Amino acid sequence: MKLRTWLIVLVTLAVAAGPLALSALAQGGGSIFIPLLVYRTGPYAPSGIPIANGFVDYFTLVNERDGGINGVKIAWEECETQYDTKQGVECYERLKAKNPVLVNPYSTGITYQLIPKAPVDKVVVFSMGYGMTAAADGRWFPWVFGFPTTYWSQASAVVRYIGAQEGGLDKLKGKKIAHIFHNSPYGKEANPTLEELARKYGFELTQLAVDHPGQEQKSTWLQVRRLNPDWIFMSGWGVMNQVAVKEAAAIGFKMDRFIGNWWSANDSDVVPAGDGAKGYKGATFHAPGTNFRVHADIVKNVYDKGKGAGKKEAMGEPLYNRGVVNAMYAAEAIRTAMGKYGNKAVTAEEVRWGFENLNLTDQRLEQLGMKGFTHAVKVTCEDHEGNGPVLIQQWDGKKWSLVSDWVAPMRDVVRPKLEEAAIVEAKKLNYTVRDCAKEK
Amino acid sequence: MIYREAGQFKTTYASDQAIFPVVQDRWVVAALLVAAFVVPTALASDYWLQAILIPFLIYALAALGLNILTGYAGQLSLGTGGFMAVGGYAAFKLTSVFPGVNILIIFLAAGLFAAAVGLAFGLPSLRIKGFYLAVATLAAQFFLIWLFNKVAWFSNYAPSGTITAPPRTVFGLMVTGPQATPEARYVVALGLAVVFALVAKNLVRGRVGRSWMAIRDRDIAAEIIGVRPLRTKLLAFGISSFYCGVAGAAYVFLYLGSAETLAFDINLSFLVLFMVIIGGLGSILGSFLGAAFIVMVPIFLTNAPHALGVSLPVALLKQIELMIFGGLILFFLIVEPHGLARLWQITKEKLRLWPFPH
């Protein structure tokens, strides 16, 4: 009975104190606020941790080295989503109260949730290399940005790369390519492009779905064995990647013919498979490793001051660098907005203009210490994708190294499909098209 | 003292059979209802409506459905997520085929589809009981999710397989889609929850509910006194799935806005089952209390350190949250196995005697 009395007191207290705790949210001050939806726990943590660290380290670098973007500090707050859409939306709604200028959802599911909210809440959705590919048509989706490239472009670039390895795109005829994908909006995103390319080049495409979270893949790899494909392309995420790489090694699949997309090629994906993972390839749109000036700057200004988000040794993992690149794009877009609207805490609408007019040249990359790290990007009102090329990297058992030059996507195939899909998706949301000639 | 029944005489059958026989209860419930409609729409921020109150109401609706089946009729089900998915996808398909039809009618029709599916998966309950039935409903969960994932027709051939709630109005007010205000969606969700709670309350205290409880308490005895197991069990499955279907439609249209099958996975089934268990099996109020507990406690635990000004790494915070939440569930179940509804009942008993207990 005593315990039960305690319980009643506890419940009463919770009912009384709950609203207070929930409403006492601090408001952002004279800085630019960027919410970071991260997942440092759960089945997707192996992928989520390095990205989150890359992000925070770059923003810390900008604040420490330059005193912010043109003197305006960046403020951020992490919110744990566990890669779960509902928790992600809860995070977004909570952090929305702090007037964010942009949001990086880091989950295609959450991106789909936030795209309809973006024009209403006036928050830029920057889904770098993920999310809804159709939203890369800026005439229909002014608030969504997906540069430097999209899943569809990536799939076409990988097919081009495979073609080059086989000795020409015409040699693809009759070849068997399997696509192993995470059974979610994210994993399915590349399917239409691959099907289109299979028709065009005559290769035999098999789509193999792996259900969330992807720890159980025996049946998938049994099918792979039966099929004996010439190439495997994988759209995996989180724990699914390491399981797939291990399974591929276990059935003795030629690892240099197994290509992961840019979310399936990180250190944490290959290390568990040990030597079996040697030769595994992955797509990317920036270089791996730490041989760039920006990394030296991060070490000097962030880690040596004890402000690093992760371990110093983990720097340079592909996904860490992905976080750095993403943070850099965001910072440069804000800087572009400041170029027009002045060096102050710019608003989300001004940042949207900054994204749309971002022109990241090679000179600018050189100044940022990122020469050779990634390629120049120019965003326009029509094209929120940049149609960026893709690199192929390979795991040698110890580190990733680049094994290809920039592979161009097949814009002639992707862009018309993208524009069609943009109309379909925009119609669902009752959007109207804007005239880019009038935007300036 | 405050809560005194002395002097309240029941002179008619109707007053004796009222849902709230005590006058004070009636006043409190009426005041709460008015407050529920007025206060949040006027005062609550987008965050409160969007992230706390709307999901709470929708989960409560689903918990009501499961409580009918598990709490009242005693049929353990792990297929809630699947039945909610049927409701969500049916509403999506129906409203894209008949865009002119009022969205509330679409919700009800979606509920009917879910009820039909629930009936089909309820058939095994005539032969198998307890944990074995749970496994059979688990099959429903996995089969339905697989089906919606596999057949692109359900998502109108969207390449990503995501269904998006189109903009729809009720009496000229936008209630679904991105332009709908959280206030409008909240009022619709609240209306659904209130109406369906009232219907459920009346169902369970009538003939149907009594036959459910008879089946739950001892099915052979129930059969002997003339309760037909086939009809009773299937009715429980049908009505429960109807509730879950409406909740699923509301889940997509009022809360998430767009959803993939992952939103309806097995975790959702467990979540709703926990709500029912923590809230109180066989209690309408319990469904609401359980939903409030499961929705709000994790959010409260995440926000509490911020409010206190303590800054912790998010990963650590999440782990602490999970541990405390799990601990709380255990604590509750040990101290009050009959759930929050029972706790409320005890508090009421105490209030009746206060300040002069025996």
Image: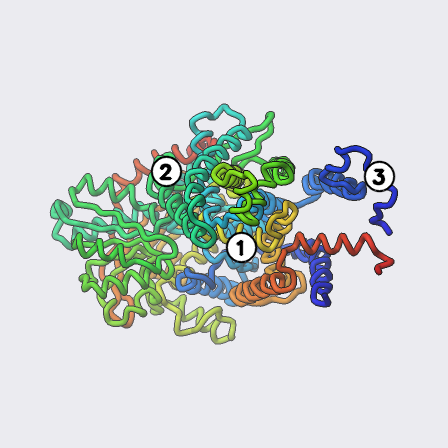
Residue beneath the point at 60% across and 66% down: B311
Which chain does the numbered disc 2 sit on?
B
Give residue A335's position: percent from left, percent from top: 49, 53
Which residue is situated farthest in the front direction here? B224
Say if mark 3 contacts mark 2, CB within 8 Å.
Answer: no
Which residue type carries mark 2? Answer: Ala
Is A256 left, or right, of B113 in this rendering? left
User: Do tag 1 and tag 3 residues touch (Cβ < 8 Å)?
Assistant: no
Mark 3, other Cα within 10 Å: few <14 / some 14–19 / many ≥20: few
- Return the residue nearer the eye: A57 or A105: A105
Task: Please give the residue where the numbered disc 3 appears in the rendered image.
Answer: B9
Q: CA distance from mark 1 to mark 3?
A: 62 Å
Q: Are the residues under marks 1 and 3 on the same chain? A: no
Note whether A30 is above or below A384 in the view shown: below
Q: Is residue A86 left or right of residue B144?
A: right
Tag 3 secondary structure: loop
**Label 2, label 1: how many angstroms apart (C-alpha)?**
31 Å
- Comparing B218 with B237, the one in front is B218
Residue that numbered label 1 is attached to: A34
Q: Which residue is mark 2?
A: B158
Instruction: Please state the horizontal and vertical placement of residue A272, each as a whole percent of the image.
Output: 31, 69
Count neighbours of disc 2 (C-alpha within 10 A) and say few if under 14, some if 14 to 19, many if 20 or more. some
List x then y, in percent, for residue B324.
59, 65
Q: Residue at x 45, y 51 (%)?
A: B134
Q: Nearer the viewer, mark 1 or mark 3?
A: 3
Circle 3 chain? B
Helix, strand or loop for disc 1: strand
* Residue A134 image offset from top left, x and y in percent: 38, 40
Comparing labels 2 and 1, the label whose residue is closer to the camera: 2
Q: Quadrant of the C terminus of chain B?
A: bottom right
Q: Amino acid at mark 3?
A: Phe
